[in-house]
Image (spheres, rainbow, N blue to C red):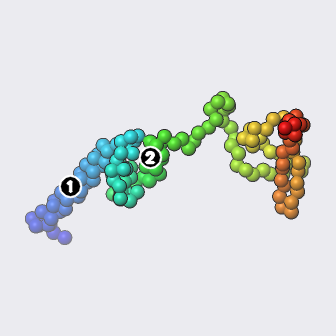
Amino acid sequence: MKFNCHNRNWKYILELSIQAQKLMAKQKKVEQKEIEPLTGEALIHKVKELGNQTKEEKARACGYFSTTKNGIERVNMMQFLNALIEAEGIDLDAKDKTSGQRGGRSANYRITVQGNGNLLIGSAYTKQLGLEPGDEFEISLGRKHIQLKQVEKEEEAETAFAY
């Protein structure tokens, strides 16, 4: 194919167009990075101000969105909702900080029969119930379940009948 003056101009215009698109995309990314998502009182105020809009529109207006490599805008709904919960002062991850205990396994409400046939209920459960060594339980067997019922201590039972 021969390149004449007309073909070279066309190629040059195409290259300029591609460069302009890349520059605009880069500029859009810079602008989006400058938008800091709202938090705290500012977030609560903005959400109330937006009133009847959808939660997606509110999240976007508060800065909780990102753009993919393909230029598709995505709303970061989980970040928005978590920030809103935190701004309201609700602590969903509250732990018992008074006990001073370190982390460890958490209770998942499943146990497995051990090789010797025993069922071991871990300390995560007993701590959650406030159980202490020596606490006694009645065992009731069902067709496919085991029920444990705590037996009252003698001291507690005697004081309960004293009234």
* Residue 66 shows in the view: no
Residue 132 or residue 60, whichever sits in front: 132
Name the kind of residue labelled 1 in the image.
Ala
Q: Residue under circle 2?
A: 84
Q: Residues within 10 Å of mark 2 (few under 14, many from 20)?
A: many
Which quadrant: the N terminus? bottom left
Residue 20: give its label: 1
In the foreground, 140 or 36: 140
Q: Is residue 86 left or right of residue 142?
A: left
Element assignment for label 2:
helix
- What residue is rendered at 80% in x and 45% in y? 121
Q: Earlier in the sequence, mark 2 or mark 1?
A: 1
Q: Residue furthest left?
A: 5
Quarter of the image for the C terminus: give it.
top right
Asked if the residue under mark 1 is in contact with the one under mark 2, i.e. CB atoms within 8 Å, the reply is: no
Of circles 2 and 1, the one toward us is: 2
